[in-house]
Amino acid sequence: MKIRCNLVLEFNNVQTAQTVLRSTKVDDFAFVTAEVKGKRLEAVIESSSVSSLIHTLDDYLACVSVAEKIVDKS
């Protein structure tokens, strides 16, 4: 069974969305597919179980949060 989560995060501007994408892309592996559309970062997270999906989503959002905080301080 495949479980999929579509995540859409809207930032203040395109540059922030692009920077966050570049910062998190390193850890995406095969679990996360992400792209920027305007000010939005759209990510698809796939997993084989609910618990694995939740773990991956938690990790991804933590990385996004750190990247966004760093961009905001620049």
Image (cartoon, grey):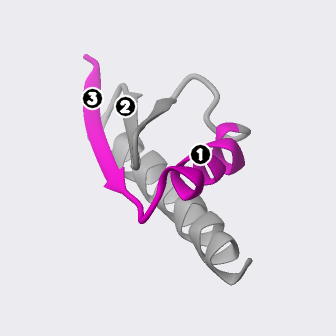
> Measuring 58% from the left and 68% from the top, which residue is drawn there?
68
Evaluate if marks 1 and 3 touch, with contact meaning CB atoms under 8 Å apart: no
Q: CA distance from mark 1 to mark 3?
A: 23 Å
Mark nearer the N terminus (2 vs 1): 1
> Measuring 65% from the left and 51% from the top, which residue is drawn there?
19
In depth, the one of 38 and 35 nearer the eye is 38
Q: CA distance from mark 2 to mark 3?
A: 7 Å
Res. 18 mark: 1
In depth, the one of 19 and 24 nearer the eye is 19
Mark nearer the N terminus (1 vs 3): 3
The residue beneath circle 2 is 44
Q: Is residue 44 above or below residue 24?
A: above
Among all residues in the image, which is located at the extreme top? Answer: 1
- Secondary structure beneath dot 1 equals helix
Q: Mark 1 is on which residue type? A: Gln
Magenta region, residue range: 1-25
Mark nearer the N terminus (2 vs 3): 3
Crowding at label 1, few (<14), some or many (≥20) Cα neighbours within 10 Å? some
Quarter of the image that includes the N terminus:
top left
The residue beneath circle 3 is 4
Res. 8 mark: none
- Secondary structure beneath dot 2 equals strand
Within the image, what quadrant is residue 7 found in? top left
